[in-house]
Structures are given as structure tokens and as C-alpha cells.
Image (tube, rainbow, N blue to C red):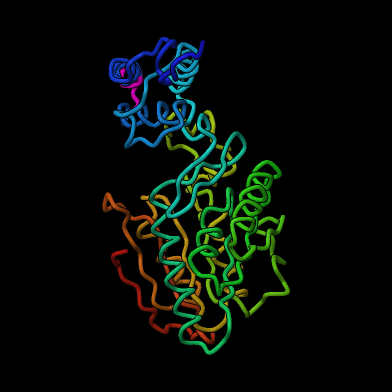
Amino acid sequence: MTTAPQHPSEGTRRHRPAPVLADAARTLAAVGVTSARAEAELLAAYVLQVSRGRLALADGFTDEQLDSYRALVARRSRREPVQYLTGSAGFRHLELAVGPGVFVPRPETELLAGWGVDQARQVVRTSGRPEALVVDLCSGSGAIALSVAYEVPDARVVAVERSPAALSWLRRNAATRAAAGDRPIEVVAADATDPALLDDLVGRVDVLLCNPPYVPLAVAVPPEVADHDPAEAVFSGVDGLDVIRRVIDRAGFLLRPGGALGIEHDDSHGTVLPALLAADGRYDAVVDHPDLAERPRFVTASRLADRPPPGAAVTWQTGSS
């Protein structure tokens, strides 16, 4: 006797997503997760192996899937980053592997990456050279460097990171993107504040980008950051500018005349960081850019051909991203 084909949901107990998601969202909201419903859906989509947009059409949770989902919600309720739970973070057009030991890329950093992509494209379009040379300092997961390599195939991209833990994630993501067909990036294990950093590239870099540690030590940060992001990727001295000051100095040597510099910063740095660049004497066209919430978020500048004479004016303005 033959048995009739069985529908996937037949013979297996299924739990409807709607009440499970509602319960999870309440749990997350109760501990202060601001996007509780969205994250409840994201975790459900991860467990059910469907897109968030297809959750309503999902067949429901099996008992085993429900146990897995509730375990993830419990971990998230203890403020473990949702990206650590799913093992990935979306950034512009990419999905990057992340986990303990690496800073989780934030949506606001996509603005700096997008500016860098535009600058690299302009170099390729106008310089007459076959490629643009782009350097990403404090690369972490490789979010900025890999976005530039994906979106500007004619860019040679060098990513610099010093943390051994972060380097493992960076190399993993770089290998994944190279296997997907992107131009491979060059990963350099080094400290962005090393005065001899990338000596072989002095005066040759077209675009230098950096999302450094920049939070002042006394600033309180959310549990996801305080308990999980590496402190060395978050904090940078009393005013948050320890690393940035050294990046500004080194970038002045690495950039070619007319080369572009972009640095993400704390929202308390909207005035002081442009002033530091202007005072350095090697930069012009200093512009500070807001994020989507209209908070000061990253500064850009152009490398002058020569250090101007004392007292020379440097253009400096607040701009839009």
C-alpha cells in the first residue's frame, strides 16, 4: 500500500508565528530593546530560514525550532547583540560575519562608506589612472573596505586592523567576498597609530577612511556596547580623540596631494574635530557631515599640495552627507 504525500506541516506539531512573535517582542521591550518587534521578527526569520518579509507565510515553528527561538530571545533579553546571535550584520549591499571580538558595524557608518565609494569612483573617472588606492584604518569586520571593493571594482583597497580577534573576522569576510568574485582586498595587521604605518604608500593614497574608537571614557554606552563590543574599538581617551589625532597626522603623510580623508566621530566632536584638521595645516575643504538623525557623524577633508604658510585660511564648513 502506498502512502499519500504528506504536506510539510502534517504529522508535525507547529506553533503559529504570530503569538510567538508577540510574546518575544514583549519580552524584549520589557528590558529596553528599542526595536523589539523588528528584532523578534529578525530572530524568527533566522530560526525559520526565511526572509522577514515571508514570516506571515511561514509554516510555523516546530517544537525544536521554538526552543531554539526562545533561547535566542532569552540571550537577546540579556542584551547580547542580535548580530552575534545570527552571526551576521548587514552593511550597505553586504552581509558580514560578526561575533565576539569584533565591533558590530553600525548603519550610520554606511554614510562614511558611501562617501568613500563616491570619492574612489571619482578618482577612477578623472585621474586617468587604472585604479584608485583606498586605505581603511581600524577596519574591524572590514565593513568599509569590503563595501568599497564591492562597489568600486577598480579600487585597490588596503584594510588595516591591529586586534587579533577582529583580524580573524576581517580575514574571514575578505575571503568570503573574494570567493564571491569581488576584487580581493589587502589585509594588514598593524596599529593605525604607528608612525611608520604603510611607509610604502606614503604620498600615494587617494582615499583614506577611518571609523576609529572615538567614545570619551566617561560616556555611558548601551549594554550591547559595554558588555560585548571590544572596548579598544569603542573608547579612546578622556575626550575620545586619542586615536583620531594620530590618524590625522599619519593621513597627512599617506595621502597624495588632493587625496580625500574621511573620519567617523562622536556626536560631541562636530566642532572640535574639524578644528583639529584645520589647525594641522595640511588639509583644506574640511566639512562635517550629519547622520540620519542630524547628529554630527563624520568629517571629510582634502590633502593640500603643500603645508600653507602660517596664518593662511583653511576652508571649513558644516555640510550634509
Residue 33, relative to residue 173: is it above or below?
A: above
Judge by depth and name the residue closer to the eye, 94 or 101: 94
Q: Residue furthest front?
A: 1
Please state the total of marks drawn on the protein image: 0
Judge by depth and name the residue closer to the eye, 15 or 31: 15
Res 281 visible? no
Q: Is residue 148 left or right of residue 267?
A: right
What percent of the width, then of the height, locates residue 6? Answer: 43, 18
Judge by depth and name the residue closer to the eye, 254 or 269: 254
Q: Which residue lies furthest to the bottom in this view?
A: 128
Which residue occupies 52% across, 28% down? 227
Q: Is residue 74 left or right of residue 23?
A: right
| Residue 214 colored in magenta in the image | no
Q: Is residue 7 left or right of residue 96?
A: left
Residue 66, relative to residue 224: is it above or below?
A: above
Which residue occupies 59% across, 49% down? 140
Displayed quadrant of residue 200: bottom right
What percent of the width, then of the height, locates residue 198? Answer: 70, 68
Q: In this view, does 135 lie to the left or right of 167?
A: left
What percent of the width, then of the height, locates residue 263? Answer: 47, 61
Screen quadrant of the C terminus? bottom left
Res 233 visible? yes
Q: Give the range drawn in magenta.
A: 28-33
What percent of the width, then of the height, locates residue 113? Answer: 45, 60
Displayed quadrant of residue 228: top right
Which residue occupies 35% across, 21% down? 28
| Residue 31 colored in magenta in the image | yes
Residue 106, relative to residue 112: is it above or below?
A: above
